[in-house]
Image (tube, rainbow, N blue to C red):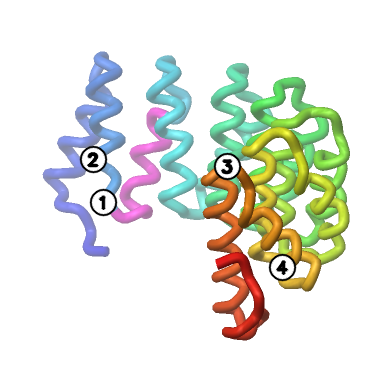
Amino acid sequence: MDPANPSQLQEIAERLRSPRPADRMLALAQLRDVPAEQAVPLILQVVDDENLQVRSFAVFALGVKQTDACLPKLVEILTRDPDYSIRANAAGALGYLEDPRAFEALVRAFYEDVEWLVRFSAAVALGNLKDPRAYDVLLRALEGPEELLQQAAIAALGELGDLRALDHLLRFAQSEDWLVRQRLAQALGNLPSPKSVSALNYLAKDPNDSVAATALDSLRRLRQRGFLEAGSPTAD
């Protein structure tokens, strides 16, 4: 990506200093097409903004515009920000970075943060990291009583692609919550196994259209990966 025009950067910098939150939000939006090395120093100017929406947008941007400065700042926010929604956003942004150095901070957030939204975001982010060390943490979330954390863990375990999780996941195939079944159908597409195929064929007949469509898509993905032969029995 070509460097941004200096006059464009100056205009954005001035908007970031505006007393109006709407101007600062607009400036952050304008950084979308600016190279990370130029954008991140400007984002960092408002990542501690007094306005919650500006702060949230800036935190998200640090997960998209990736430089060496992003990881330590996001870890600091995840650890210290007083607002739980901002901490959750920081966890999500750390997942976007896909940097294994975020692993320990995300695990601490999952175990220690008192807000379920932060723990949910941390679990999803651990899946995005695709770090095999996350298996035990995610299994604990899967076995816990909180349904939303179970959903996050199902998706994240699918991202890890660790077949050890398969038997733990399959018990959710008959969950009363269609969102849980849909998460499972998506996760199974990353876990090539005869058990996965059998469960996906079952879920492809689910009364919920979204679950059935997701299951069919996962079967197609398994075929594309060479796990299913072209003539293998599926629900499609």
Q: Which residue is drawn at 76% across and 35% down?
A: 110
Q: Which mark is residue 208?
A: 3
Q: Residue at x 63, y 70 (%)?
A: 234
Q: What stretch is highlighted in magenta?
A: 35-46
Is residue 150 shown left or right of residue 233?
right
Q: Which is nearer the eye, 160 or 34?
A: 160
Mark nearer the N terminus (4 vs 3) = 4
Based on the displayed image, in which of its 4 quarters is residue 223 positioned? bottom right
Q: Mark 3 to mark 2: distance in Å?
A: 40 Å
**Dot 1 lies on which element?**
helix
**Comparing labels 1 and 3, the label whose residue is closer to the camera:** 3
Q: How far apart are marks 4 and 3 (CA)?
A: 19 Å
x, y (%) of residue 201?
A: 68, 62
Asked if the magenta segment contains residue 94, the reply would be no
Q: Quadrant of residue 120?
A: top right
Q: Position of residue 67 (x, y in %)?
A: 47, 54
Looking at the image, is mark 3 or mark 2 nearer the viewer? 3
Secondary element at tag 4 = helix
Q: Position of residue 36 (x, y in %)?
A: 37, 53
Upstream in sequence: badge 3 or badge 2: 2
Residue matched to label 2:
30
Q: Position of residue 193 (x, y in %)?
A: 77, 72
> Which residue is identified by label 1?
33
Count residues near mark 4 (Cα–Cα under 10 Å), then give few for <14, some for 14-19, many for 20+: many
Residue hosting label 4: 197
* 68 vs 170, nearest the viewer: 170
| Up-down relation of residue 28 to residue 230 (above or below) | above
Judged by depth in the image, the label closer to the viewer, 2 or 4, is 4
Locate the C terminus by quadrant: bottom right
The kind of residue on which mark 2 rests is Gln
